[in-house]
Amino acid sequence: MPGRYVVAVGGADSAAAALTWAESHAALAGVPVVQVSVADAPSSRAPARSPGAQVAVLAPAPISQALAQFLHDDDVLVIGTGKRGFIHSRVYGARGIQIASAAPCNIAVVPEIDLRFRRGVVAGVTSDAAMAAVVDAAGSEAASRDDTLQLVHSSFAGFVPGPVETAGPVLDHALAIGRARRPGLSMRSRLSTRRPAEALLDASRTAALLVIGAGTEHHLGSVAHDVLVNINAPVLLIRRTD
């Protein structure tokens, strides 16, 4: 369970989508929402405010470093995006990916899209240390929504797909993790030969949430980076694997 949902707010309209997402998830988990802004960040309009949220104002710069120092390992950092092909806001601009890279905790990136009619949770799985945490987080979201969890794995390796005999066990292992934690959860798997980011974006076109590994500490993996550049659904980046 997260300790806090920390929303990086600014003057951008996209902050409202991030705040709404954070509030709904925090209420379900019974944890606080903290709205964080930067002391002298330029803005053409006041940021969205939640009457029930705590408010924190950080020293101005560098923003990614200030946020990294403020965040706890068990927080979830929530960032809004204008869904323009790149993480975007009037406060953070193209530094959104830098912020996500520096954050020591899980990160949710929420685009400005209508989520009311979206269904299903997608988890991108691969044979790394984050698999169990990705499946667990995605399973928790699917269970809370009484929805289906789809596990997606790409066998693409370099310029050619990887062998199916190595890809199959990855999905089997992920399914076993999900069934062990949530026996009644509706689950299915999907093996793709497309590049990982392409496979994930295709699977999440109508999804309520996409969950993937964030990469190593202080570094955003290439797949996570490519997904965020072309984001089409809320994305939860899993940094913690314990």
Image (cartoon, grey):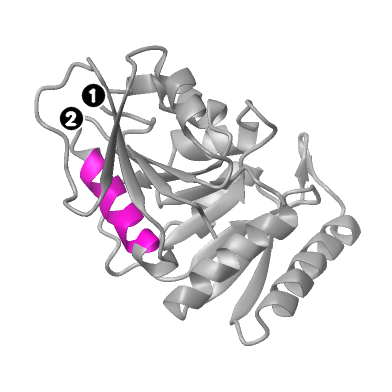
Three-letter code for the amino acid on which mark 2 is drawn: Gly
Residue 195 lies, in percent from the top left, at: 65, 43
| Image quadrant in which you'd find residue 12 | top left
The residue shown at (32%, 29%) is 88
Q: Which residue is mark 2?
A: 11
Does the residue at mark 2 contact the one at mark 1 (Cβ under 8 Å)? yes
Number of marks in picture = 2
Residue 190 lies, in percent from the top left, at: 66, 65
The residue shown at (44%, 50%) is 4
* Mark 2 or 1, closer to the camera: 2
Q: Residue furthest left?
A: 45
Q: Is residue 112 visible?
A: no
Ranked by sequence position, the earlier of labels 2 and 1 is 2
Query: Label 2 crowding class (10 Å Cα cut-off): few <14, some 14-19, many 20+?
Result: many
Residue 98 lies, in percent from the top left, at: 49, 23
137 in relation to 142, above or below: above
Q: Which residue is mark 1?
A: 90
Instruction: Work out how far the residue at label 2 is from the one at label 1, CA to CA, in angstroms.
Output: 6 Å
Give 109 or 52, whichever is nearer the viewer: 52
